[in-house]
Image: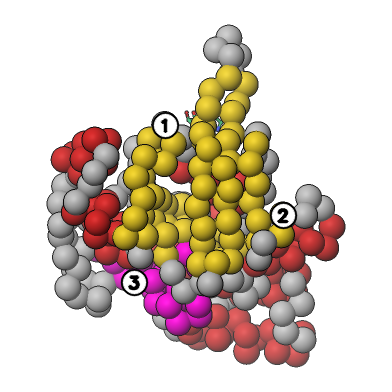
Amino acid sequence: MTVLEVDHVTKTYAVRGAGRITALDDVSLTLESGRTTGLVGQSGSGKSTIAKILTQLETPTSGEVRLDGQPIPRRGAGLRAYRQTLRMVFQDPFASLNPYHSVRYHLERPLRLHRVVPDAELDDEVRRLLDRVHLEPGTVIDRRPHELSGGQRQRVAIARALASRPRLLVADEPVSMLDVSIRLGVLNLLADLGREEGLGVLYITHDLATARHFSDEILVLNQGRVVERGPADDVILRPQDPYTRELRAASPDPEKHFASASGTHGGAL
Ligand SMILES: Nc1ncnc2c1ncn2[C@@H]1O[C@H](COP(=O)(O)OP(=O)(O)OP(=O)(O)O)[C@@H](O)[C@H]1O
Ligand SMILES: [Mg+2]
């Protein structure tokens, strides 16, 4: 089921002395519940600009984003409801978590803000969220970010994103700052959440191999334009567009299979 539509979105920025640059040029995409859409492209191709538009940090210069067929409200309760529906997982879990606060605090905050459960159930719900991301509640709940490993931190960030019971997750390079050996575990977690909780996921990455493995559909961005889109295997294994072919040639091993879902086979990631 289509949850979110990005409809012919263009974003330009005024640049001092250089007129305007076009970060996104007529981009359309949809996010469907229970499906992962991969967004690939080189640095500067506009991937994070899409994330910023989806999280309402930026507004499109033209075009529209719709949730369940309705334009996103600019303010008030409608905008708050949208922010509860679409959550973001950032690249750097260190920067996105507050060093002075415990894991419990990070998870209770959105639960209170969105009134997800009555106060008496906050502790249970925090533990449930930690279980959901395969962290042992008793071990991590009272720790602060610097007392966790990078992978644990990113799992806390994912648990926080889940706290408001969203329908959509946008993950912008969610594992590129993590140690190679733990990347697959975090990506498998995101994929499982997508499937099991019916979340629509936008997985933004430079990495064609994981994009192929973890996405149902892939879009290739080049200088703000979608140059190719389709089922993940078609786009990565049988690219039609010259730019996608170039990306593939420059990529370590896009045919790599991730036979093990255990997260221990980091390989060339
Ligand atoms: N606030 C801004 N003002 C001016 N230009 C911007 C702004 N934000 C992004 N851009 C430009 O828009 C283009 C797309 O940037 P974007 O951050 O979306 O790329 P990206 O695909 O996420 O790159 P990376 O892979 O390096 O994260 C780039 O040319 C960038 O310099
Ligand atoms: Mg980016």
Q: Residues within 10 Å of mark 1 (few under 14, many from 20)?
A: some
Residue 229: percent from left, percent from top = 36, 50
Disc 3 or 1, which lies upstream in sequence? 3
Residue 177: percent from left, percent from top = 37, 51
Can you identify the residue that label 1 sits on?
Answer: 223
The structure residue drawn at horizontal position 24% and vertical position 35%, both measured from the top left corner, is 242
Residue 34: percent from left, percent from top = 47, 74
Instruction: Write down the region rendered in magenta.
Output: 178-201
Residue 58 can be seen in this image: no
Residue 3 can be seen in this image: yes
Helix, strand or loop for disc 1: loop
Helix, strand or loop for disc 3: helix
Can you identify the residue that label 3 sits on?
Answer: 188
Q: Which circle, 1 or 2, is nearer the viewer?
A: 2
The structure residue drawn at horizontal position 62% and vertical position 21%, both measured from the top left corner, is 14
Can you identify the residue that label 2 sits on?
Answer: 71
Q: Of the residues shown, which amino acid type is indicated by label 2? A: Pro
Q: Distance between the residues labelled 1 and 2?
A: 26 Å
Judge from the rendering whether residue 240 lies leftward or rightward of residue 104; answer left or right: left
Disc 1 or 2, which lies upstream in sequence? 2
